[in-house]
Image: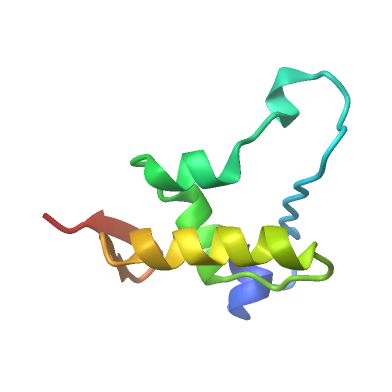
Amino acid sequence: MGSRARTDYLVDSDVDVLVVADNLPGDPREAYDVVRRLKGKSTFLVEVLEDRLVVYADPRFLESVTRKYREVRGRWVRRGRTWEGLT
């Protein structure tokens, strides 16, 4: 995700990483229900999945997230670096 995954990064661009895993520490900022969040109105996960570069994933989990992504992707259009909802 981000500029490195899209290959439009600059020399000083950071690297964005999203880790989704079972049994993470109890910090609530780390609890992220990917499939539920895809159903919402945020484009964050749509962008992550659009630009993804998967290093490792549980095949069943990746398939379920990809299936949900395909369902919701049609609700959004990308215009440059921004997303607009389709009505």
Q: Residue 76: x and y, percent?
A: 28, 61
Would you identify the image quadrant in which residue 78 lies?
Answer: bottom left
Would you identify the image quadrant in which residue 14 lies?
Answer: bottom right
Q: Residue 37: x and y, percent?
A: 49, 40
Outermost residue on the front side: it is 60
Query: Which residue is at 49% across, 39% downward?
Result: 36
Left or right: 58, with 48 as reference point: right
Report whether residue 35 is seen: yes
Would you identify the image quadrant in which residue 55 lies?
Answer: bottom right
Labels in figure, total: 0
Query: Which residue is at 55% across, 66% downward?
Result: 66
Height in image: 83 above or below 36? below
Quadrant in the picture for the C terminus: bottom left
Height in image: 44 above or below 10? above
Query: Which residue is at 75% across, 60% downward?
Result: 15
Outermost residue on the left side: it is 87
Quadrant in the picture for the N terminus: bottom right
Report whether residue 9 is seen: no
Q: Residue 85: x and y, percent?
A: 22, 54
What is the basis of the colouring in this image?
Answer: rainbow
Left or right: 35, with 60 as reference point: left
